[in-house]
Image: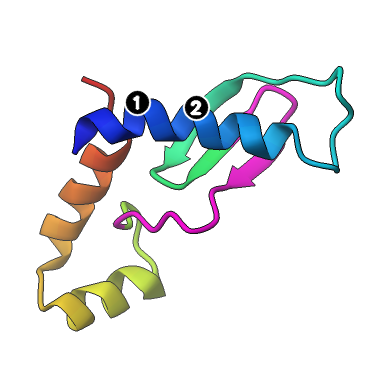
Amino acid sequence: MKAWRQVLLPSLVLLLLSGPSHSQDSSYRVQRVIDGDTLLLTNGERVRLIGVDTPEVHESKKLHRDAQRTQTDIETIKALGKEGFSIH
């Protein structure tokens, strides 16, 4: 499960940065992973990875909806969310 992140995440970032809203000569690095599907770039822009849904790590309505939908306790979901963006 962890190996796909090492391949997929950089590929998705490159695809997003090479899209029509950015010029060919613009490139930015990921400054910080906010959570498993949201990145902060060095230019201050947040990038949300569409189609990637990772468990929440912060209190939110979505966290509680996911807990109810999956019948999983909130602390387990938060732990899975932290695992989703940690690099080993």
Tag 2 secondary structure = helix
Image location of residue 18, percent across then percent down: 74, 32
User: Where is 53 relative to 20, above or below?
Assistant: below
The residue under the point 17% across, 65% down is 74
Residue 43: mark: none
Image location of residue 78, percent across then percent down: 22, 53
Q: Residues within 10 Å of mark 1 (few under 14, many from 20)?
A: few
Residue picked out by circle 1? 6
Q: What's the magenta bit mostly, secondary-structure-wise?
A: loop
> What's under tag 1, amino acid-wise?
Gln
Q: Nearer the viewer, residue 66 or 26?
A: 26
User: Where is 28 relative to 50, above or below?
Assistant: above
The residue under the point 57% across, 22% down is 31
The residue under the point 48% across, 58% down is 51
Would you say the residues marked 1 and 2 are in contact, meaning their CB atoms lie under 8 Å apart? yes
Q: In the rendered view of the protein, which quadrant contains the N terminus? A: top left
Image location of residue 24, percent across then percent down: 86, 24
Q: Residues within 10 Å of mark 2 (few under 14, many from 20)?
A: few
Image location of residue 13, percent across then percent down: 58, 33
Residue 10: mark: 2
Residue 46, by quadrant, is top right
User: Where is 7 relative to 56, above or below?
Assistant: above
- Give the side of residue 28 with respect to residue 39, left or right: right
Q: Nearer the viewer, residue 47 or 51?
A: 51
> What's under tag 2, amino acid-wise?
Pro
Q: Is residue 46 magenta?
A: yes
- Give the side of residue 62 with respect to residue 82, left or right: right
The residue under the point 29% across, 57% down is 55
What is the span of residues highlighted in magenta in the rendered image? Answer: 40-55
- Distance from the alpha carbon under mark 1 to that under mark 2: 7 Å
Tag 1 secondary structure = helix
User: How many circles with numbers are drawn on the protein?
Assistant: 2
